[in-house]
Amino acid sequence: MARRMTDIEIAARIVPTMLRWPPESAFDPMRECVEALRDTLHVLDEKCDRAEQDPELKRESIGRRRTQLGEHALAQLLAFEPFLKAELAVNERIKHLDTKTQNSLAKALNELREGVAAAKRAVVERCQMSAHTFAPR
């Protein structure tokens, strides 16, 4: 049985640098995306735990169920709507800001991209999927 992910572990893996982002509203769409990424991992973890605790499922069935859950989560993350919205909002706002804020937003957006990749790795790890199943993008 796989170990559950803790809140601290998820927060540490998914864009921990968000804590350093300025409080400016231009960063709000990215903050919302980070929360959506973390929520996605919490939901996945809960579903995997339910499958692992189901007394009617055999070991092979648990593995298949985790793989199904992982594949579904990875499919969500490939075109993660909150990220697409955040990226669009940042690219739209960046044109109207001073250079320092533009640079901060661009850096934060890259950190957010890395956060999506970290979420994909966390899905693969939690669902005990093989490396062949996961192709990072």
Image (cartoon, rainbow, N blue to C red):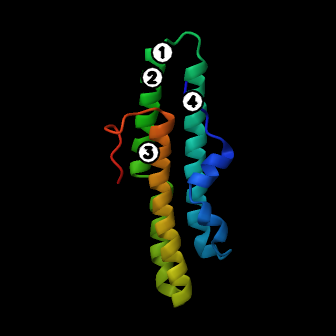
**Viewer-nearest of discs 1 and 4:** 1
The disc at residue 76 is 3
Classed neighbour count for the residue bearing mark 2: other residues with Cα under 10 Å, few (<14), some (14–19), many (≥20): some
Name the element at disc 4. helix
Residue matched to label 1: 59
Question: In whole angstroms, how far apart are the C-alphas of marks 1 and 4?
Answer: 16 Å
Name the element at disc 1. helix
As drawn, the residue found furthest toward the top would be 56
Question: In whole angstroms, how far apart are the C-alphas of marks 3 and 1?
Answer: 26 Å
Name the element at disc 3. helix
- Across and down, in percent, residue 73 comes to 46, 40
Q: Are marks 2 and 1 in contact (CB under 8 Å)?
A: yes
Question: Which amino acid type is shown beneath numbered disc 4?
Answer: Lys
Question: In whole angstroms, how far apart are the C-alphas of marks 3 and 2?
Answer: 20 Å
Residue matched to label 2: 63
Question: Which amino acid type is shown beneath numbered disc 3?
Answer: Gln
Residue drawn at (33%, 46%), measured in percent from left and top?
135
- Across and down, in percent, residue 46 comes to 61, 32
Q: Are marks 2 and 4 in contact (CB under 8 Å)?
A: no
The disc at residue 85 is none
Classed neighbour count for the residue bearing mark 3: other residues with Cα under 10 Å, few (<14), some (14–19), many (≥20): few
The answer to which quarter of the image holds residue 14 is bottom right
Between 90 and 1, the one nearer to me in the picture: 1
Residue matched to label 4: 47
